């Protein structure tokens, strides 16, 4: 239902991208949200409303590839050279078999959107988001597509709603060759 709402809001024609989700989920050790997979298959990775970066699953997308971002985040989180403090404190980046964060989106304003994954609760995918302007984490017990829809369509979805800026609910595919000249780099903190 929420995926369809995002499609209708953007006027997007679903792409029908095929992904080997079993291989992705095997690497992570947990299943991904079904609606996220549906969103990616319809849109691919790219930018909503000229400001919300949606990470997909395609090695060709470079920085729009959520697995590539997760691997980089995990590497930094594990690097003893940065001390014992995580960039996502009080949480940690998800490690297979454990509990932690996996980023699936961000904004040009350095807002970040993560799932809190827990190998012991494989069907549970709460969203943790933080705004560059407002300190601390916000937890949302809703689907990825509902959260994305609310960010794009509801001006009062504070502090993350972008409808208040009248940017439109457009979608521009990432640089994976899906539509030619799209944005090439999200501002992933």
Image (cartoon, rainbow, N blue to C red):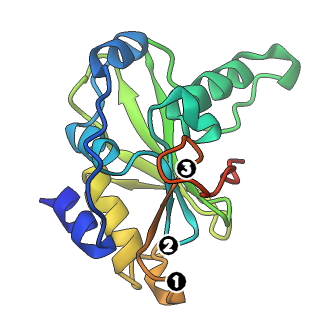
Residues at badges 1 and 2 in contact (C-beta under 8 Å)?
A: yes
Q: Earlier in the sequence, mark 1 or mark 2?
A: 2
Residue 158: x and y, percent? Answer: 45, 76
Reading the image, the residue beneath label 2 is 49
Residue 65: x and y, percent? Answer: 54, 35
Q: Mark 1 and mark 2: span between their CA atoms?
A: 6 Å
Q: Secondary structure at mark 2?
A: loop
Q: Residue at x 32, y 27 (%)?
A: 19
Reading the image, the residue beneath label 1 is 167
Of 65 and 189, the residue lying toward us: 65
Q: Secondary structure at mark 3?
A: loop
Left or right of 70? Residue 154 is left
Mark drawn on residue 65: none
Q: Secondary structure at mark 1?
A: loop
Q: Within 10 Å of the Cα at label 3, are there few (<14), some (14-19), or many (20+) other Cα atoms?
A: many
Rendered position, 18 above or below 42? above
Reading the image, the residue beneath label 3 is 174
Rendered image quadrant of residue 117: top left
Of 45 and 188, the residue lying toward us: 45
- The answer, for residue 117, to whether it is visible in the render is yes
Residues at badges 3 and 1 in contact (C-beta under 8 Å)?
A: no
- The answer, for residue 91, to whether it is visible in the render is no
Of 109 and 39, the residue lying toward us: 39
Q: Quadrant of the N terminus?
A: bottom left
Q: Residue at x 45, y 40 (%)?
A: 56
Rendered position, 155 above or below 93? below
Q: Within 10 Å of the Cα at label 1, are there few (<14), some (14-19), or many (20+) other Cα atoms?
A: few
Q: Mark 3 and mark 1: span between their CA atoms?
A: 18 Å
Q: Nearer the viewer, mark 3 or mark 1?
A: 3
Q: Residue furthest right?
A: 81
């Amino acid at each position: 239902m929420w995926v369809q709402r995002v499609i209708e809001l953007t006027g997007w024609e679903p792409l029908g991208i095929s992904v080997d989700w079993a291989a992705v989920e095997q690497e992570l050790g947990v299943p991904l949200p079904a609606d996220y997979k549906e969103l990616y298959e319809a849109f691919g990775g790219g930018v909503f409303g000229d400001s919300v970066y949606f990470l997909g699953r395609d090695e060709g997308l470079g920085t729009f590839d959520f697995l590539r971002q997760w691997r980089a985040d995990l590497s930094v989180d594990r690097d003893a050279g940065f001390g014992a403090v995580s960039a996502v404190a009080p949480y940690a980046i998800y490690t297979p078999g454990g509990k932690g964060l996996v980023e699936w989106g961000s904004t040009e304003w350095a807002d970040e959107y993560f799932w809190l994954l827990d190998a012991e609760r494989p069907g549970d995918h709460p969203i943790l988001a933080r705004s560059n302007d407002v300190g601390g984490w916000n937890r949302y017990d809703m689907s990825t597509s509902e959260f994305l829809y609310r960010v794009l369509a509801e001006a009062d979805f504070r502090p993350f709603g972008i409808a208040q800026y009248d940017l439109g609910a457009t979608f521009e595919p990432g640089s994976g060759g899906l539509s030619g000249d799209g944005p090439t780099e999200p501002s992933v903190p």
